[in-house]
Image (spheres, rainbow, N blue to C red):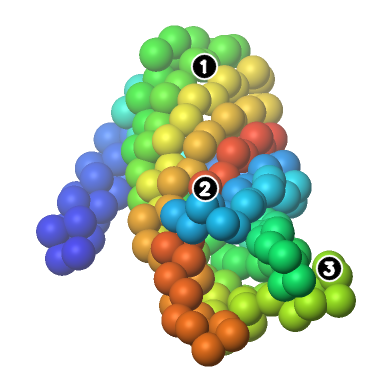
Amino acid sequence: MKKFSLLIAFALTTTLMFGQLKFGPKIGFNASKLTTSLDSVKSQFKAGFQFGAFVRIGNRVYLQPELYYTSEGGVFEKDSLGKSWKQNISLGSLDIPILIGFKIINTELVNLRILAGPVASFVVNKKITDLNSVFGPIHKASISNANWYIQAGAGVDVWFFTLDIRYQIGLNKIIKDVSYDGKNINFNTSNNVWVVSLGFKI
C-alpha cells in the first residue's frame, strides 16, 4: 500500500508539472452481479446508477481520480424443498477510483482512450429485502463496509463530452460468513460491475 501511494503521488506530481488539467461532472448506468461460489445459490444482475465528478491530469498519458456515489447490488436465490428464499440486496457506496489512462488517438476534437486502476469503495447505505415468505441468511451486518476493486475499460472524447465503458472486478469478500439454520455459510461473494458513464469536461 505504501509503494502504491508513492507511485500515485509521483504520477500526480509529474502530470501536474507537465500536463493539462480538466475536470467535470459525470453520470452513469451500471449492471452489477454479486457472485457466489455456492452451487446451491443463484445470483442475478441488478441495474443501478452513479453520479459524481472526475479530474483528468495530463495529456497523452493521464491520471484520472474520481469521486462518485454508486447504487448497485444483486439478487440471491436458493431453491430447496420447503426452505426456498430470495433476497434483494441494494447498496449505496462512495467510490474513489484512481485511474491511469493512455490516449490511443489524441486530437483536438476526438480522443480514443484506455484506462485502468484501483477503486476504494465505502458502503454508506444498505437495504436487504426478502422477496418471499422465508427469511434469507443475509443481514446488514453481513455486508462489508469497505471494499476494493480493479477497474479497466475504454473511452472516447468528442469535443467536451467523455464516454467510458468499464468493467469492475471485486477483490475482497463483500459478504461475510453468515449463520443460517444452525450452519455457518461462506458465500465467498465478490461484486462485479459493468459501467457506462457520460461526463462533461470543463
Where is residue 53 drawn, in percent x and y?
61, 52
**How far apart are the alpha carbons under marks 1 and 3?**
45 Å
Where is residue 89 drawn, in percent x and y?
70, 66
Residues 22 and 47: in front is: 47
- Left or right, residue 36 beside residue 49: left
According to the image, label 1 marks what residue? 111
Dot 1 and dot 3 residues touching (CB under 8 Å)? no
Residues 195 and 7: in front is: 195
**How far apart are the alpha carbons under marks 2 and 3?**
22 Å
Circle nearer the viewer, 2 or 3: 3
Which residue corresponds to the image point at 48% horizontal and 83% vertical from the top-left? 183
Where is residue 145 drawn, in percent x and y?
50, 77
According to the image, label 2 marks what residue? 192
Name the quadrant of the N terminus: bottom left
Name the quadrant of the C terminus: top right
- Left or right, residue 10 beside residue 95: left
According to the image, label 3 marks what residue? 131
**At label 1, which amino acid type do we have?**
Asn
Where is residue 97 drawn, in percent x and y?
45, 52
Residue count near mark 2 (Cα–Cα under 10 Å), binned few <14, some 14–19, many ≥20 = many
Dot 1 and dot 2 residues touching (CB under 8 Å)? no
Q: Earlier in the sequence, mark 2 or mark 3?
A: 3
Q: Earlier in the sequence, mark 1 or mark 3?
A: 1
